[in-house]
Image (cartoon, rainbow, N blue to C red):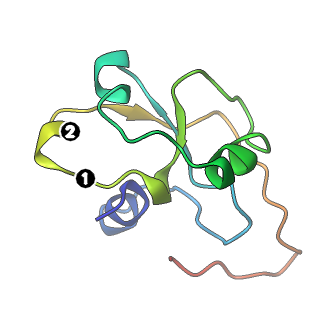
Amino acid sequence: MSMLEAAHENDIDLEGSLACSTCHIIVMDDDYYNKLPEPTDEENDMLDLAFGLTETSRLGCQVIAKPELDGMKVALPAATRNFAVDGYVPKPH
């Protein structure tokens, strides 16, 4: 399960409107961040569009929950950049 899916299942307001970078999360602890696989070039390209980018930013749809990540804390940025058109109804992915 990705962090995006977990957020949706727990009624946490994390977008995922297929307008990439809207599911931007910030991993709060470097030790946990370093346990994650390296982001792909595609993920890094999407992160370049994210609001409030940090050294430990990732896309929530790319961070998969695993036992070694138990206890990891993430934060949501203060805002998102949603490039979807007005009236678009996002669907979880």
Q: Do the residues labelled 2 and 1 touch (CB within 8 Å)?
A: yes
Q: In this view, does 1 lie to the left or right of 40?
A: left
Q: How crowded is the residue under tag 1: few (<14 C-alpha within 10 Å), some, or many (20+)?
A: some
Secondary structure state at the residue bearing disc 2: helix
Is residue 36 placed above or below 85 in the rendered structure? above
x 64%, y 78%: residue: 90
Residue 65's label in the rendered image is 1
Using the numbered discs, state the Cα–Cα distance from disc 2 to disc 1 in whole angstroms. 6 Å
Residue 48's label in the rendered image is none
Q: Is residue 33 left or right of residue 42?
A: left
x 17%, y 33%: residue: 71
- Give the percent coordinates (x, y) of residue 19: 74, 66
Outermost residue, top side: 30
Residue 74 seen in the figure? yes
Which residue has dot 2 on it? Answer: 69
Which amino acid is tagged 2?
Answer: Leu
x 18%, y 50%: residue: 66
**Would you identify the image quadrant in which residue 47 lies?**
top right
Which amino acid is tagged 1?
Answer: Ala
Residue 80 seen in the figure? no
- Give the percent coordinates (x, y) of residue 45: 74, 47
Front residue of 93 and 48: 48
Q: Quadrant of the N terminus?
A: bottom left
Q: In this view, does 69 lie to the left or right of 48?
A: left
Front residue of 41 and 60: 41
Q: How crowded is the residue under tag 2: few (<14 C-alpha within 10 Å), some, or many (20+)?
A: some
The tally of labels here is 2
